[in-house]
Amino acid sequence: MNLKTATALHEKERAFVPKEFKVTTWSRLKPYFNELLNRPIGSVEELEQWIKDKSELDAVVSEAFSWRYIKITVDSADEKAEALYQYAVQELSPKITAFEHALNQKLVDCPFTAQLDPALYGIHLRSIHNAVNLFRDENIPLATDIQMKSKEYVKIFSEMTIGVDGKQMTLQKASSLLEEPDRSYREAVYHKIHQRILQDTDQLESLFDKLLAMRHQMAVNAGFQNFRDYKFRALGRFDYEVEDCYDFHNSIRTEIVPLTDELNRYRQSALHLDTLRPWDLFVDPSGEAPLRPFDTIEELVGKVIFCLNELHPDFGKTISIMRDMGHLDLDSRKGKRPGGYNMPLHLTGIPFIFMNATNSLIDMRTLMHESGHAVHSFLTRQFKLKSAKRVPSEVAELAAMTMELLTMEHWSVFFPDEGELRRAKIAQLEYVLKVLPWIATIDKFQHWLYSKPDHSREERQENWMGIMQEFNSTLIDHSNLEKYAAHLWHKQLHIFEVPFYYIEYGLAQLGAIAIWKQYRENPRRAIRNYYNALSLGYTRNIREIYEAAGIEFNFSRDYVSQLGAFVKGELDALL
């Protein structure tokens, strides 16, 4: 099926909001919400149609908002795009939120709701009941303020540049220079990056202080003692609790950190270093020049499509369609906001990938990752309920992180030289293990931040340093770098923009390792299970989706130990 056919078929499903309707002003949008709110419902059939119509309206609004966000990230200097985005957040969103609650309440109160098929609507209704329970009128303007305030973070970082080799470059681009073999050069770049971040330390600390206070107030308004407990419910974490996060922290500290120590010991020996410093962590242990898997964006996209096709033709077709639609913005340039994302577009079903490629191995991995999200979006396009397409992050990141590992079997298209292919695989597997302690660090820090909202900046810094040390490899020497280490959390966008959305990466990484292990044993079965799990969207709970993939949703020390040992064994075979 080509893109035009796929889009046309999707458009034919629209029955409530006219195809030509565009989200512009509230006066044009409000009648559709009013119609849903005032429509009489006299049967289960009428209720089901009402739910489908509401879902269609949600998709129309969601896609319009998504495009406004995309446009401010691809060009932070676009004043018109910024104005449209601010109008959506400040004017449209609060009014929509109020109507959303009224519509959710109508669904909860409807006498026919109890007769809906739980197999079709159970997950949807669970989310609706949760939203109704959490809603407070006073949180509507507060949520708007938080959303606008949090966007200041990316603006601050997007304007940070440093001079290297006579050129000004973004910190993201400069970070790729930490892969260079010249140690003195790496050290100089490392200092420049962190000295530049320190220039905005007070601004970032003040920004977080304001976000912390507003988020805590939101939680108190909703009847919670702290934002951590409120956010767990707001994120819809029905299938695990706070204690499970503590189990994850403990398992990573006891089972994975020792493995990262072994990897760093090997790195230190291979590089012939007396001590391992932070600027030694990204250079290839062989001491050779950084791997450059592509020269142009077109080459990157073409080779990623090849890898995806080798796994399943539907996977490669996804990125081909997005490329033809212009739904890929991958190059790094001045004025473009940092980071990367896959933006689901629930109306058309054709997502958008944004990133800042600088011709590195990390760029290749990032596009593989975002391609996993994109494939997930395509495999859920058939659902009529928008809620079925809005998968929880623990599942969304499983799709993305698994794609990184599965495609590794076909990376020879990027690295025809056996030596370079080996180096690329070693780098990937090192990352798989080493990212887990950082995820645990960020998550545990956030538990502390929000469960003790009255803390001082000094206490915050002290606890950050303690938590970081708990998960940091003992072989990395941070002496005389404490001023940098004390503020390393400033580099983590999630803390500022999407609090508590980070442990999902760790939970999903464990799942991805398990699927890859399955793939190494039986490729066909693993791809079938992966495909089927992603195709479920959010029509089953998290544990059931993981089971469909043939794996466990498990953070125990024993399970984590098994997965860590598998990755370490694969690494040992390459070293």
Image (cartoon, rainbow, N blue to C red):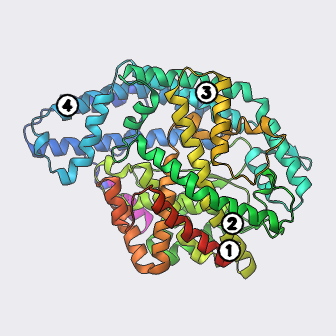
- Cα separation between marks 2 and 1: 14 Å
**Mark 1, residue position:** 414
Q: Secondary structure at mark 1?
A: loop
- N-term-proximal mark, 1 vs 3: 3
Q: Do labels 4 and 2 touch, CB within 8 Å?
A: no
Lateral position of residue 193 relative to residue 155, left or right: right
Image quarter of the N terminus: bottom left
- Mark 4 Cα shell of 10 Å, populated few (<14), some (14-19), many (≥20): some
**Residue shown at 63%/28% (left/top)?**
460
Q: Position of residue 80 (x, y in %)?
A: 60, 32
In the rendering, at what x and y percent does residue 100 appear? 31, 31
- Tag 2 residue: 427
CA distance separating discs 1 and 3: 41 Å
Give x and y (percent) for residue 164.
88, 47
Q: State which tag comes first along the sequence, 4 or 1.
A: 4
Q: Which residues are the magenta region?
A: 1-11
